[in-house]
Image (tube, coloured by chain):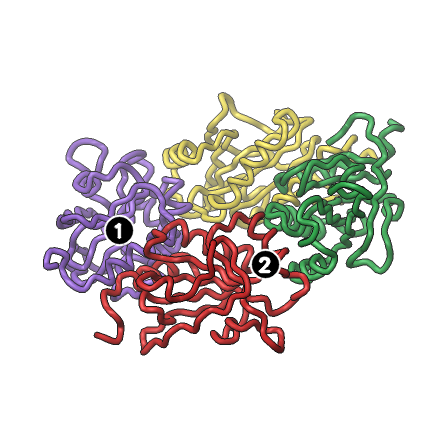
Chain colours: A green, B red, C purple, D yellow
Amino acid sequence: MDRSRPSTAPEWQVSQWFNTDRPLALADFAGRVIALHAFQMLCPGCVQHGLPQAQRIARLFDASRVAVIGLHTVFEHHAAMTPEALAAFIHEYRLAFPIGIDAPAVAGPIPQTMASYAMQGTPTLILIDRWGRLRKQSLGVEDDMRVGADIAFLLAEQEHPDDS
Amino acid sequence: MDRSRPSTAPEWQVSQWFNTDRPLALADFAGRVIALHAFQMLCPGCVQHGLPQAQRIARLFDASRVAVIGLHTVFEHHAAMTPEALAAFIHEYRLAFPIGIDAPAVAGPIPQTMASYAMQGTPTLILIDRWGRLRKQSLGVEDDMRVGADIAFLLAEQEHPDDS
Amino acid sequence: MDRSRPSTAPEWQVSQWFNTDRPLALADFAGRVIALHAFQMLCPGCVQHGLPQAQRIARLFDASRVAVIGLHTVFEHHAAMTPEALAAFIHEYRLAFPIGIDAPAVAGPIPQTMASYAMQGTPTLILIDRWGRLRKQSLGVEDDMRVGADIAFLLAEQEHPDDS
Amino acid sequence: MDRSRPSTAPEWQVSQWFNTDRPLALADFAGRVIALHAFQMLCPGCVQHGLPQAQRIARLFDASRVAVIGLHTVFEHHAAMTPEALAAFIHEYRLAFPIGIDAPAVAGPIPQTMASYAMQGTPTLILIDRWGRLRKQSLGVEDDMRVGADIAFLLAEQEHPDDS
């Protein structure tokens, strides 16, 4: 995790939300740790490892302390991974946490949030601390033990890192 | 497996083929055992278990003796599992065996081959013997050891079952 | 599998049997295929892969057609892998098929049956056909699908291989 | 984890140590979190799940902050799980962290440390905080994510729990 001077996480640009009755923004989660899982529904590593791990995070930690958010960052096969296809995918895989569709770029294949976070692919796990600051961004899948520890370290922080 | 009087397997009705340069029919495989894997690209059991097993069948048995064929039997979420989406799926999951799209019915959600075989869902594994006869049809996922044995029993048959 | 002129499997030299009320010999299994699993109780590959596979063989195939036999071929750590230790191991791992202790050599660490089969280590899977002939001997762990197919091929043989 | 008033962990009673050149005591680890894994070498749940998890703890966390200690708490099959057998087991399973043999009781099958901690079986995972206090004791195997989080929470504690 980033223990240097962390910066505020970029706001999410989402064109459509699932599993929530209203749009979500970073500010809605102040005081909570956010585990943001960026995925594509046709990415094998996301389906086999990343999304099951996101579900385990949601099961283990209390929702009042850790928010799990999915972000569908389609950067390839755009015609296949439509909102309608994602809706079917969410239903079939029984994903219960809020999932946003990363807003397409005005030009080019990389969607807006993916670009603002400089993500290099999917799956990417992002941890945001209780003050809205980007603390970890990791391409690929990490061991559950490490992810559990990383989240716990953020939960245990008692004060704004800059205050110490 | 069906060791009673087996019947001829129904012909496949396919609207589009992938991984083959020409349409395939049962008669093309006379003398070979066929492992037909019916799946949907958004069916978790197919993605996690059925398709990997089909790939293992294709790896283990010589292609001159056992043909592995995929059949995309879309009976739900039709708008999500389009041919274009399937093409992306096949690419991402590195599926190398021939895959046909089961032809949509004139009316109703069940595609034609799925109906003629009376399949009850996906994944379904179907084994067809060297004389084109339906010998096994199984919904869900069976152990690799059983599937390996079932295919070997069909390979070992020396003569047309009716001749014995 | 060995499809050349196979030779008769060497008789087993066993100093003590578990899970059977009388000593077993090859001749007891005429007409049946034998899956002989040679293992050591402190061999990680045996505990994690080989023995669970032997249990799956015993579950899948009818005992009247396929006999699963364990052989404890201790060739290292002799002081640790005693008959008393093996008894506890069999109990804890719920092994239900007959298991023999390969008889120690008069001189040297390699027990007698291990030597007569020229086994190179553990786990080793040995398949013996219905006429008592050695047809497969494989060090390490093979995929379940291959093992299922190998056993089925032996079950499907209708006559003594030399008669054909 | 125990967030109430935790008590000091009982001292270990060990008759023989492996993977360390001198006997170890709780006081040697002041300032470090201890993950104590109590196991028996013939306990399937320990071999398949508990010990691999202990190895993952040792790999993930810096040894200067988290000490992984094995404790061989033999309470059954005493004649099978001798020190000599354990030495072979440690060698074969490539266990690299310090492992102590829980000292046999003067009377009865339960060894001394197992009794003083009131452990109910194996595997048992015990977490001891940086002030030598017992914070978690769990029979069976827990998910890696939870274990990673539990250890991280203990690492993050800035002061003696009683001081707060």
Disc 1: which residue:
C36
Q: Residues within 10 Å of mark 2 (few under 14, many from 20)?
A: many
The residues bearing labels 2 and 1 have C-alpha atoms spaced at a distance of 40 Å
At 56% across and 46% down in the image, what residue appears? D119
Task: Locate residue D71 relative to residue A6 in the image: left or right.
Answer: left
Left or right: A11 in relation to A90: right
| Residue identified by numbered label 2 | B41
Residue extending farthest to the front is B22
Mark 2 belongs to chain:
B
C77 vs B70: above or below: above
Q: Relative to the observer, which residue lies in front, A133 or B69?
A: B69
Rendered image quadrant of residue A155:
top right
Is residue C135 visible in this depiction of the protein?
Answer: yes
Q: Chain of mark 1?
A: C
Picture quarter containing residue C114?
Answer: top left
Which quarter of the image is occupied by the N terminus of chain B?
Answer: bottom left
Locate residue D41, reporting x and y percent: 44, 42
SS label for mark 2 = loop
Vertical side of C146 occupied by B24: above or below: below
Circle 2: residue type = Met
Q: Is residue C11 visible?
A: no
Q: Position of residue B77 (x, y in %)?
A: 66, 66
Q: Position of residue A35 (x, y in %)?
A: 75, 44
- Dot in front, 2 or 1: 2
- Three-letter code for the amino acid on which mark 1 is drawn: Leu
Quarter-wise, where is residue A92 in the image?
bottom right
Image check: C103 left or right of D76?
left
